[in-house]
Amino acid sequence: MRYHRMIHLYFFITWIGFLIGPALLPANAFRITQFISPETCGECHSEIFNQWKHSLHNLSQKDPVYLSVAKYIRKGLIDQNEIAEAESCVKCHVPVGVITGYPQKTSDDEKKIPEIANQGIQCDYCHSATSAEKMYNNGLQLSPGNGEEAPGVKRGPFHDSESDFHESAFSEFHTGSEICGTCHNVKHVAYMTDLETTYDEWKNGPYNHNKDPDKRITCQGCHMYQRPGLPATGSTQRIKNRGVASDDGPVREHIFTHYFVGGNRFVPGLFDDRTKPEMADERLKHAASLAIETDRIKDGKLEIVITNIGAGHDLPTGLTDIREMWLEIEIRDKNQKKVVYTSGKLDKDRYLPDDSIIYRTVFGDGKGNQVWNIAEAKEILSDKRIPPLKSITETISLPQGKQTGLSVHVKLLYRSAPQKIVDQVAGKGKFILPVVTMASAERDF
Ligand code: HEC
Ligand code: HEC
Ligand code: HEC
Ligand code: HEC
Ligand code: HEC
């Protein structure tokens, strides 16, 4: 019996190893002492350090929303494929730990994670990268130095960069979307279901400009141009950020910023970061446009058009099974001064009604039943999102076919996750996720 179990275990490990092994750097590829702490880099790159500090890259292992979800989805799993997925989160969320030996599994004791690895996706990790071996589940290949005594080569966008501390080298890899895309494309480790496809959405979209690389707008072209007051989206200017890369370095035409802000208006604020929540707000407010089509009010039907004007990928992107982007509609009868139609209004618990118009993906268990635990995701049941520079038209039937005397109010709203799921995962009321108004429109008929 015991022998049989061992055989099973052996085959299982070999099989998982076959699936993910050749793609991953082995656990003992590097030693933790080879990596230099972000604080050390910050001694000369102080501005970049301050931008990166409390970014979601810095917080990828400390983010309490991530930690609660990771623990919750691991509970009660018995299927080995599903356990393998639930244990794979650290590959991207604690990458320095994984390639230096600890942690290897999501459920490994957090308290034993070395301090440097706890700092998430950090300076020395990204700037030691040389290439991506595959474009999903973190295929980054690395060539780090040997700690502060021999820092090795830091790779970046400059051809002529010099530092007394480390060697520098131009790296074309750092100037393209692939360095981001290898993590911003997530597949289930066993079922290969596409769980996140931000890079693919960008690659197949208009900002890639396949035929003309000079016109291409990379991830960096939006996300590493943003700074407070300058959202740098597809619908706003992406003005160059003149300045210095290191405190005593030469002035350069553009210094790529390191805030790495997306739609998360919540988590950096838990760490007393006041800047990044505001920047997420600015980014979200320039992502979409909303229009009520007056001339199309026919047969008691109203048309609302939502366009992705600012994001280089679908709206929403990333974890689109839990991100919540929806329409809130209220129609009032002006004469009777009462509300005659609503959709997408939060209830007293801040939960969204089931019949709301939501843009998202829904995963299934392989038999057509909805699952929200990504470890169980065998199929995509539905995918309703807005690709870059594309529109979706929603048709609303007006109450009793009425066409006049009505006042229509529509909002496009965003929240990082349904409050119901957050309550279930973290405990009711522990985290109250903010709702951002991305766009709004009003019209009287
Ligand atoms: C997620 C990966 C990532 C992380 C983490 C990261 N960087 Fe960068 N960094 C880049 C990329 C990519 C570029 C170049 C962008 C381009 O050319 O399109 C860059 C550019 C730079 C440059 C050149 C000057 C500039 O900003 O344009 C310096 C210096 C730098 N980073 C230092 C740091 C330091 C210090 C940290 C930590 C506080 C850090 N980086 C964290 C990816 C990263
Ligand atoms: C003792 C000061 C000092 C420290 C510490 C330091 N750097 Fe630098 N670094 C510089 C200077 C100076 C430059 C040149 C700036 C320029 O060319 O504009 C530079 C340039 C860079 C570049 C640009 C390379 C290129 O060719 O594009 C990167 C990337 C970089 N540093 C990353 C790091 C990382 C990561 C760390 C921590 C592991 C670090 N630096 C620590 C001083 C330092
Ligand atoms: C044309 C500008 C633009 C480009 C190019 C772009 N983005 Fe974005 N990105 C945005 C905007 C605007 C948002 C905010 C709306 C949203 O959340 O989707 C955003 C949001 C995000 C988010 C947060 C999504 C969420 O809601 O959780 C991530 C992650 C992200 N981008 C990663 C990337 C990556 C990786 C690339 C390259 C493959 C990229 N972006 C290219 C504009 C851009
Ligand atoms: C090693 C894997 C990895 C690499 C490389 C990486 N990212 Fe990320 N990124 C993550 C993870 C993991 C998170 C989310 C952490 C969290 O929310 O707990 C994240 C978060 C983000 C966010 C914030 C999303 C939000 O919801 O607000 C943006 C924006 C982003 N990354 C852009 C980039 C860009 C641009 C690059 C390339 C220069 C890049 N990332 C490279 C793993 C990576
Ligand atoms: C291949 C890389 C990769 C792996 C593996 C990965 N993630 Fe992530 N994770 C990301 C990226 C990239 C983001 C940011 C996307 C976004 O903001 O929409 C993210 C964001 C998150 C967030 C959102 C956090 C917040 O504050 O809103 C949660 C929760 C999360 N991941 C859970 C997990 C869990 C649980 C696992 C393991 C089952 C896992 N991730 C495995 C790349 C990864």
Image (spheres, helix red, strand yellow):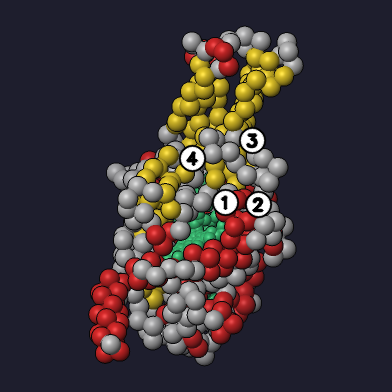
Is residue 417 depicted above or below 9 in this figure?
above
Which quarter of the image is occupied by the C terminus? top right
Dot in front, 3 or 1: 3
Q: Secondary structure at mark 4?
A: strand
Amino acid type, residue under disc 3 in the picture: Lys
Q: Is residue 343 above or below residue 104?
A: above
Q: Residues within 10 Å of mark 4 (few under 14, many from 20)?
A: many
What is the quadrant of the N terminus in the image? bottom left
Q: Badges 4 and 3: C-beta atoms under 8 Å apart?
A: no
**Considering the numbered disc 1 on the image, is that residue within a helix, a strand or a loop?**
loop
Say which of 17 and 210 sits in front: 17
Q: Residue at x 58, y 11 (%)?
A: 402
Question: Amino acid type of disc 4?
Answer: Tyr
Please name the residue shown 59% across and 57% down the image.
424
- How far across and down, in percent of the image, does residue 316 sit? 49, 45
Image x and y of residue 366, in percent: 32, 53
